[in-house]
Amino acid sequence: MLIYLHGFNSSPQSTKAHQLQARLEAIGRGSEFSCPALPDRPAQAIALLEREMTRAPAESTTLVGSSLGGYYATWLAETHGVRAVLVNPAITPHLGLRAYLGPQKNLHTGEPYELTEQHLAQLQVLWVERPTRPERYYLMVTTGDEVLDYREAVEKYVGARQLVVQGSDHGFAEFEQYLDSVLEFAGIP
């Protein structure tokens, strides 16, 4: 089972989610893909993801988290012992999102909400200083990420499998070129 965790103000309509789903469908494994719409409240997002993870055994589950989804994936991987692919992951969103406090709108659905101190406090609770088993992680970052400093992720996930793509952007426009490496890491032939 591959569970895609979208980023801040994103949704299951994200390009990377669609690319991953299409690749799994092309090899006849589309039923092993899930991409739930994550609530804006971190505690609710984690609860939803933990319910989703009960659909398959931990040893056959791989999380694919993009940006804030990568932050969630790290906490879930540490807590439940699953594999995680992290795509330009947020490292300290409880600090970085402070600049975005106030009215927000989901980029895909248009749904408005208020980003509050409570959101940041819930994110702080999910912070993992260092992965305990880096071999459970596949870090995919781009040096041209205009939102997050890729070097922070490279340092945090020392010992993990790492792909550092020169240039690109936070959205990781070249993600589709690396789908086979994601599936291989997840144990999907």
Image (cartoon, rainbow, N blue to C red):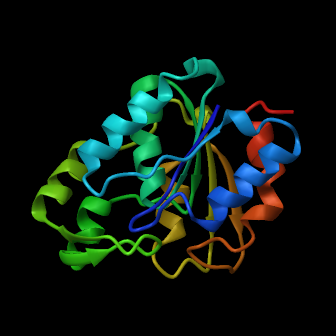
Instruction: Tell whether 74 sits left or right of 102.
Output: right
Query: Up-down: is 111 above or below 22?
Result: below
Q: What quarter of the picture does the C terminus occupy?
A: top right
Q: Kindly identify the residue that appears in the image at 78 percent across and 63 percent down.
A: 176
Q: Kindly identify the residue that appears in the image at 69 percent across and 33 percent down.
A: 32
Q: Quadrant of residue 3?
A: top right
Q: Report x, y in % for residue 136.
A: 59, 33
Q: Kindly identify the residue that appears in the image at 80 percent across and 45 percent down.
A: 25
Q: Quadrant of residue 186?
A: top right
Q: Nearer the viewer, residue 32 or 98?
A: 32
Query: Up-down: is 107 above or below 177?
Result: below
Q: Quadrant of residue 142?
A: bottom right
Q: How many marks?
A: 0
Q: Report x, y in % for residue 162.
A: 67, 52
Instruction: Let me know if residue 117 appears in the view.
Output: yes
Query: Up-down: is 163 above or below 144?
Result: above
Instruction: Let me know if residue 78 appears in the view.
Output: no
Q: Nearer the viewer, residue 4 or 140?
A: 4
